[in-house]
Image (cartoon, grey):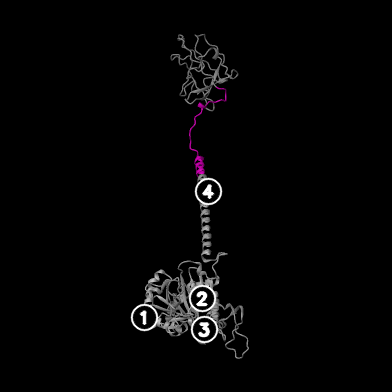
Amino acid sequence: MNDRQYDPYAGSDPYAGEYAGEYAADQYQVVGYDEYGRPVYQQVPQAQQVQQPQVPHQSQPPQQSQGYGYDPYAGGQQGQQGYDAYGGAGTSYDTTGSPYGTAAPQDTAWIPQQQPEQPAPEAAPAPAPPPRREQPGEYKTEQFSFIEEPDEESEDVIDWLKFTESRTERREEAKRRGRSRVVALVVVLALVIAGGVGYLWFAGKLPGQSGGDDGAAAASGPQKRDVIVLHLHNTKGDGTSTALLVNNATTERGATVLLPNTLAVSDDDGTPTTLGKSVDDDGSTGTREAIDTVLGTQVEGTWRLDTPYLENLVELVGNIDIDTNADVPDPKAKKKGEAPLVKKGEQQTLSGRMAVAYATYRASGEQEADQLQRFGAVMQGVLRKLSSDPQAATTTVQSLAQILDPSLEDKDLGAFLAKLADRAKGGDYKTTLLPVGQGGTLTDGAGEAVVKDVLGGAVKSPEKDAAVRVGVKNASGKKGAAQDARVSLVNGGYTFIDGGAGPAAQPASQVTYADAAKKEQATEVAKTLGLPASAVRKGSTAANADVSVVLGQDYRTR
């Protein structure tokens, strides 16, 4: 192969060697290719044009310009040696393999071969001159091709956008949940505050709200009460002390109602007796029924607490602190004038033996009510020290090792005492005495203050088919009138409640009912006692009776 330059597109340029005149002096070189694969030319300045060597040659007819050695209009005739597109003779390359066209290098002279004379072909019309190209270094958009290739970072960008979008959504969702929680919290707080205020108003604990000391009156309508009867037996002396322990679940208050032994009750056959005698004669069951009859309550069980067990109970709770109203001498003292076992004063700490001595003490000339008040103080002090946990309170009861009444099991008693302990510690507990008059009957006003409000005797409706309770007060001036009325009423299926004697004789008898539903029963009571229908009227009755009867001078004994 020779070292002549080779242009693969030499001879295919339709514009090569065809321009004389204004384009004859211009020389072009290939600088690139357009989008269709055609060569792109650039004008070569005159100073850089390759000088062809002057070679003598024979005179011959004018031939076409030898610019690129190929004339598409020469009718297949070549005026000079052409090129072989596949690497034939007359082709040269530089060291990089880039074609230089047909121009010979500076150190090599190219001598054209003599061709036989050919008649000059008919001149073909000159093609239009090539358009002027852009200045060197300038490129048009069609010189480039753009291929869309997958960008590795594009997926990362999309993932990042998705991540930021999802994170924004999560933040917005968290904000919405936060706002919802705040709203819910505000609503809950409002309900709690409203419920607390409502409870305080219901229980009568709001500042300035009147309600007295009796919390049961703060709620209207029927109330739920749990009641058990407590008998304290003095094993070293005579007699018993009785109290009703009351837990009002409606008003959440507790109370101890002290019952005097002189309270008039009836035994199993309706015979009048006293509470003290009923405890000794009728036992726990008969006494419970007698109390229910006279007070209109429903006692659920009996707790018999002998004085040794009371002493143990105080020791188990860790002594008690109460206000004492008298000096109590030591029963074991051998000489008079020795220091009292219990001193009078506020917040005196009492051991088990001291508590028993104070609860059973009755000085000479004192009424039974004085001793009952001391008994009530000791029991309230015990409740303040007892555990409010039902299980712990039950354990304390079991530790006493006492024999309980069949009507009350240790776990029931423990749970009941735990509730009362909670009331006593919170200040929602009081001790009250049931006042009775001469003959053991309830005094006027006692029914409203204690039986109705504390025990709920008037509020609680008697059970279906229960005997109608008839309270009888003798105002006839006849001593045997009340006993005669009792026999008639008991034989008629009614429960007799002794109302005592009236302050003065009354001419006409009266049969009174408070509830309109009791009118028919009041009419039947009047017939049973032989009283006219005109004696029946609506009015106030005793708190522990459904129908009240006042025997007048018109009542005829049998």
Q: Which mark is residue 171?
A: 4
Q: Which of marks 3 and 4 precedes in the sequence? A: 4
Q: Which of marks 2 and 4 precedes in the sequence? A: 4
Q: Which mark is residue 464?
A: none
Q: Secondary structure at mark 2?
A: strand
Expressed as whole percent of the image width and height from the top left, the position of residue 331 reads: 57, 87
Q: Secondary structure at mark 4?
A: helix
Residue kind at label 2, given as amino acid type: Thr
Residue hosting label 3: 307
Magenta-tinted stretch: 134-162
Towards the viewer: 326 or 553 = 553
Residue kind at label 4, given as amino acid type: Arg
Label 4 Cα neighbours within 10 Å, binned few <14 / some 14-19 / many ≥20: few
Q: Which mark is residue 491?
A: 1
| Label 2, label 3: how far apart the Cα atoms are | 18 Å
Nearest to viewer (mark 4 / mark 3) = 3
Whether 536 is among the magenta residues is no
Q: Which of marks 3 and 2 precedes in the sequence? A: 2
Q: Does residue 37 appear in this view? A: yes
